[in-house]
Image: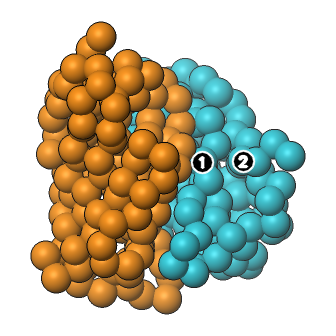
């Protein structure tokens, strides 16, 4: 059974701070990883994906991947109240089917 | 370009009733998926269709059936609804199984079974 584990939170940070969200995965062969944001009552929307070890930056968001540790993280710099949402980590399985397995999500609250 | 369209948005069923959730995508994607989302459980894969003409079970297929009607449409059927199937259902599609292909989600169907 492939698993993706996330800190369930909730995580609460002040406006302007860095929010750090973490994820580990069980499938050693997984090659790519995705972060989705989900506002309450809405569908998940893609923030970014990463498949190379190291950091990948997109605006205020930085994804970090360490395949040796089977660890993925998402940093949100200069957090805004509009970043308050649930963040879902997903790993693509290593088989040719390439299905995505999701963690349970981390709820983030950014307070003004 | 509507993306992934799901109908209905809300549905209330009595135990034992049947219904079909509809999903269509206009992005010419090959793969389509049905997930359910329950509080504290994340997204769990029910069924998927890697390509037109194929379907297969995911993590939680019991009580469901699917049909990949054509490349655009992928429906999910509950033959005899049970309270345990109360959930939010998301349809999603993906262009293929390449490593940088993300899932694109529909807006969801909120189903309550009483």
Query: Vertically, is A82 above or below A72?
Result: above
- x and y percent of residue A69 in the render? 13, 76
Question: In the depicted view, which residue is nearer to us: B33 or A10?
Answer: A10
Q: Residues within 10 Å of mark 2 (few under 14, many from 20)?
A: many
Query: Vertically, is B78 above or below B99?
Result: above
Q: Residues within 10 Å of mark 1 (few under 14, many from 20)?
A: many
- Assign a secondary structure to mark 2: strand
Q: Residue at x 24, y 29 (%)?
A: A17
Q: Colour of chain B?
A: cyan
- x and y percent of residue B109 in the render? 58, 33
The answer to whether any part of residue A73 appears in the image is yes
What is the residue that sits farthest to the top in this orientation?
A: A112
Is A83 placed left or right of B52 in the picture?
left
- x and y percent of residue B45 in the render? 43, 59
Is B85 placed left or right of A42 in the picture?
left
Q: Which residue is mark 2?
A: B4
Q: Residue at x 83, y 55 (%)?
A: B26
Q: Which residue is mark 1?
A: B105
Q: Are marks 1 and 2 in contact (CB under 8 Å)?
A: yes
């Amino acid at each position: 059974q492939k698993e993706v584990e996330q800190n369930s939170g909730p995580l609460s940070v002040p406006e302007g701070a860095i929010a750090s969200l973490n994820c580990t995965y069980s499938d050693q062969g997984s090659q790519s990883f995705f972060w989705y944001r989900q506002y309450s009552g809405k569908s998940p929307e893609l923030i970014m994906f990463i498949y190379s070890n190291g950091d990948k930056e997109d605006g205020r968001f930085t994804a970090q991947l360490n395949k040796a540790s089977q660890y993925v993280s998402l940093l949100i710099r200069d957090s805004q109240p509009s970043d308050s949402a649930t963040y879902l980590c997903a790993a693509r399985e290593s088989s040719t089917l390439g299905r995505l397995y999701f963690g349970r999500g981390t709820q983030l609250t950014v307070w003004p | 370009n509507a993306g992934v369209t799901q109908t209905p948005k809300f549905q209330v069923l009595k135990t034992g009733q049947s219904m079909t959730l509809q999903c269509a995508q206009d992005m010419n994607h090959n793969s389509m998926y049905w997930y359910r989302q329950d509080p504290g459980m994340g997204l769990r894969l029910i069924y998927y269709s890697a390509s037109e003409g194929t379907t297969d079970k995911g993590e939680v297929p019991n009580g469901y059936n699917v049909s990949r009607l054509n490349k655009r449409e992928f429906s999910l059927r509950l033959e005899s609804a049970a309270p345990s199937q109360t959930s939010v259902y998301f349809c999603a599609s993906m262009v293929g199984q390449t490593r940088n292909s993300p899932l694109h989600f529909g807006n969801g169907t909120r189903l309550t079974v009483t």
